[in-house]
Image (cartoon, grey):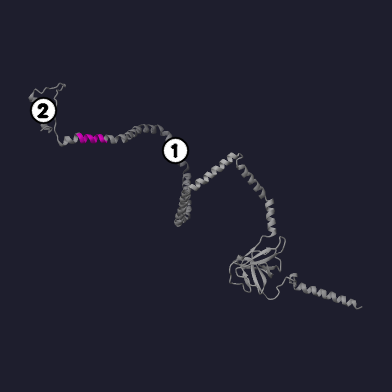
Amino acid sequence: MIGIPVRRLGAAVGVALVALLSACSVQPTDLPLPGTRVSGESYELGIEFGSVLNLPARSKVLMNGSRIGVLRDVAIAERDGRRVALATVDLQADVQVPADSTAELKQATVLGDFYIALTPPAGAFSAMLADKGVIPLAQTTVSPQVEDLLGGIAALANGGTLEKMQRAVENANRSFPVEIAERDHGVEVLRALVARLAGEQDSLNEAIDSVSQISTTLDTNASKLAFSFDVGPERVSGAVSAFLGLSNVLKALGANVVPIGDLVIPRQETLFALIDVVEPLVATATRLDTTLPEDIAKLDRILADQVGPLVANPSVNIVDITTDDGRPDGGSNPDRTAAVAAVLRMIGAMR
C-alpha cells in the first residue's frame, strides 16, 4: 500500500527533471566535470582564427606546454570586412599573456583532439593582454589537419601525380646519351659554357646595365608611354575605320572602275614605241652623267691654255704661206707679203 505512491513520486520527479533540463538546453560540457573549468579567479581573452573546424568544446589552452585555461565558446566576428571565428577562452588570473603572443590550433597526437597553444615572443616584451583582450587573426595559425593530409595523399596517389613524376624521370633518363663518352663530352661542353660565362662577366654586367638604363628610360617616359597606350588604340581604330570607309567607297564604285588591263593592253604597241624613243635618251643621259666631268675639264683646259692667252695678247706668228692649190709660196713676192700683212692689220690680228 505504501510502495505504490513512492514509485509514482519518483517517476514524477524524473519527468520534471528531464523537462527542466530540456527547457534550459543544457549540454554535457555545461556540467561541472573535472578539466572543463578554470579553478579560482579567471579573466576572458578572445582569439581570432580563420577556421576552428574540429575544435571541440571546452578545449584546453596551453602556453609553453602548461595548461592555463579552457575554451568557453566560439562565435562569428568581423575583422576588416572579413568573417573570422572568435574563440573566447577563460585563463587563470595569475597568468599574463604578452600582446605579441601567437596562437595555433594543434593536435597532441595524429588522432587526438585539437587544442589552443599560445606561444609568447622570443625577445623582450612589455605589453600584456588585459581582460577581454584579443589576439588578432594575423597572429594565429591552424596546423594541417589529418583529414587534409590524408586527402592530399589520396590525391597524390590517385590523381596521376606519381605517374607524371615517373614519366618525367623516364624522359630525363632518355634525354641523356647512353654512351659514357657522349655524356662526358656534354658535361665538358656545359663546363666550358659555364667558364665562358664566368669570363664574360663584364659583358654580362654591361648587358644588365643596358637593361637597367632601358628600364629607367621607360620609367622616366612613363607618361608618354601611357599617352601612347591610351591614345594609340583609338588612333589605330580610326585608321581601320578609314580603311574600311575607303574599301566601301571602292566597292560602291563597282563597275564604274575600269580594270587596269583594259587601259594597258589595247595601248601596248604605242607604249612600246614610246619606250623605244625614250630608251636612247635615257642611255645618252646616263653616258652624259659619267663623261660630263671629263668634258668640262677638257673645255676648261682649252679656255685656259689657248683662248685665254689669245684674248689677252692677240698676235699671230706666220710660219708658212701656201697657194690655193696647196703649193708652198717661197715668199719671193714682197708685194703679196705686204698685202697679207695689211689684211692682218686691218682685222686686228697683227700690229
- Residue depicted at x 28% and y 36%: 293
Question: Residue 327 lies in what quarter of the image?
Answer: top left
Q: Nearer the viewer, residue 96 or 191?
A: 191
Name the dominant secondary structure of the magenta segment.
helix
| x and y percentages locating residue 256 in the rendered image | 45, 42
| x and y percentages locating residue 324 in the rendered image | 15, 23
For this orientation, the residue located farthest to the right is 1
Q: Which residue is tagged 1?
A: 260
Element under label 2?
Answer: helix
Instruction: Report the disc number at residue 340.
Output: 2
| Residues shaded magenta | 296-305
- Residue depicted at x 23% and y 36%: 300
- The amino acid on which the numbered mark 2 sits, given as a three-letter code, is Val
Instruction: Report the disc number at residue 26.
Output: none
Against 174, residue 92 (above or below) is below
Q: Is residue 255 left or right of residue 126?
A: left
Question: Residue 119 lies in what quarter of the image?
Answer: bottom right
* Dot in front, 2 or 1: 2
> Quick one: label 2, few (<14), some, or many (20+) residues within 10 Å?
few
- The amino acid on which the numbered mark 1 sits, given as a three-letter code, is Ile
